[in-house]
Image (tube, rainbow, N blue to C red):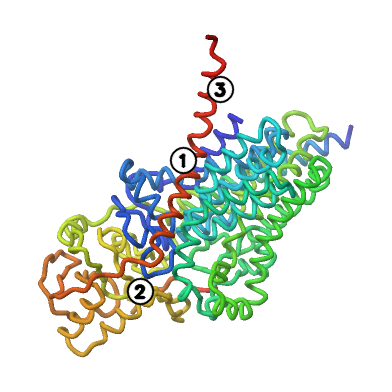
Amino acid sequence: MTNSILAAIAALVVGGGIAGATVFGLVSSQTSAPSESPGDAAKPVIQYGSRG
Amino acid sequence: MRIAAIWSVVLTALLLGPALGPGFVLTYDMVWVPDLRVGLDAWGLGSALPRAVPSDAVVGILDEVVPGAWLQTGVLAGTLVGGGLGAARLVAGLSTAARLAAVTVWIWNPFVVERLVMGHWPVLVGYAVLPWLAAAAMRWARGGPGARSGALGLAALLPIGSLSASAGLASAVVVLAFGLRRSWRRDPVLLVLLVAANLPWVVSGLAHRATATSAAEGFELFALAGEGGLPPPLTALGLGGVWNSEVLPDSREGLLVWVALVALVALAALGSRSWWRATDARIRTAYLVGWGFGWGIAVLTWLAPGALGSLAAAVPGVGLLRDGSRLLGLCALLVVVLVAHGVERIVRSDLDRVPRLVLAAGLVVHPIAVLPDAAWGVAGRLAPVSYPAEYAHLRAAVGDAEGAHVVLLPFSAFRAPAWNGGRTVLDPLARYLRPDAVTNDELVVSGRTLAGEDPRAAAVARALQAPTAEARSRELAALGIGFVVVDRTAPGPAPDLAGRPIFAGPTTSALALPGPVADPPRGAWRPGVVTAWAAFGATLLGGLLGGPVVALTRRLRERPR
């Protein structure tokens, strides 16, 4: 009995936590300042990309 | 499957967001235009390597019927929805939560996001087709009443899944892994379909074999890369690892990369035993072969870029493996079925209804939680734009360049126009204008310039270095260049040329070079290329029309007389 209650609580915490984190991540990623565009027209040539 | 379809549509809308609106999404290698003309380059008869064969020709034909912007939206959305549905079908026997988790993992992962921003849409179309190809190949291999639909499915899907060389390679691996049965009756059919679907880029590549070797140093720059501090092999386990750090969402550069990998591996490990028990040994092997090929090639480019580079510099075609993580889509097949089985195991436990539903919801959306900034067009990176109004006038002024070719100045491959939000993209004018354009195929990566392969581009670069404007124009005309278009907003030198101005807009201008203009090259291996396209078209049409024709024939036969 105790085990099933604990399992239910754990399931609610994990599932709810992930769902909450998903909503938070979606909202914050859309409301944070946009990252600078990597393309820079002032450069002598536009690069295909950069290796990190 | 209805709920999986709805979930696929929801995820696609959330991921693409503004990209589904009016306009064109222009990012790195992805250039769509209102009306793409199918010139020699699109058929694979140009002087450059056939990097957009057969995708450009297919788009050029389809946009005669559907406007280019609509077509792009349809392709991007259809790719994600179709792929998600295919993933759900792979685990059709499992619970709803498991199928939805498969859809989420298939659509919302680093491979899809990175390739979207890189603009590798033919790779993504090929990726979307993989689960359907696997299912069709299994039907064909099993034989019996489903074999015919399997063969027709392969005929229809293989050309769609082979719109680029690397997509064709991935499709071939899946079809061979799932379909080969050492049967003299069945295997040849698979091989014929595979060859026919890939023939356009193979034949064109063979016609360019003299130049189809790649710069050895490119392999170091394009090798599998680590993300967020993860070593490259582990990054590849989580379906990430693109070489270009500019396309990474912020969430792929921090702790969330580790969290994503731990979650994925844990679910996959949890599901591995039940998947193993529930799956036929041959099918298991097929999944493992696909995963091993994708991950193995990716890791090989990281482990031995020098050796692969040396090989590619000598052997045409090895350059296909240069972009290390491009084949990682192959790994997704095994990943989604393992994760789905893992989710199945958790949600089948003895929990009450409400906790089970909440846990299932969390597991289904967990890929979004660890990659949240993929949402809404990768945080706006896929925002559509409109071409400047002057481009239409420029296109009309240049016309067909009187049968000659065009050079675009500054003579560099990429642009970052303000009207595209400053985002990097291949010079769109090369596709926007009607004539074939000779473009610079040198690539600048991390400040290093990689030599191109197109001998004609190299000749144009030399001509542009002639001492006087008259000499430059004369040398270009001798190469079959009739018109030169200058984009004054693009960085880089645009040397003066002698010629007749035919257009002057706010940001672009065009010049007709004085004659005589030599006839541009018409391409080698024309009969071979025509045959290849005939085989490609016949396979596609056979696959698309074969099903309805067979059904109609059967109905007519069964009709009482």
Position of residue B463 measured from the top left corner of the image (x, y, whole percent)? 26, 83
The answer to whether residue A20 is visible is no
Figure quadrant of residue B139? top right
First in sequence: mark 1 vs mark 2 = 2
Q: Which mark is residue B554?
A: 3
Check disc 1 and report the residue beneath it: B541
Report, in whole angstroms, how far the alpha carbon at label 3 lies from the one at label 1: 19 Å
Determine whether the residue tagged by mark 1 lies in a helix, strand or loop.
Answer: helix
Report the amino acid beneath label 3: Arg
B526 sits left or right of B435 in the view: right
Report the amino acid beneath label 2: Asn
Q: Nearer the viewer, mark 3 or mark 1?
A: 3
**Do callouts 3 and 1 point to residues on the same chain?**
yes
**In this view, B6 is above or below B130:** above
Q: Nearer the viewer, residue B237 or B196?
A: B196
Q: Which mark is residue B440?
A: 2
Label 1 resides on the chain identified as: B
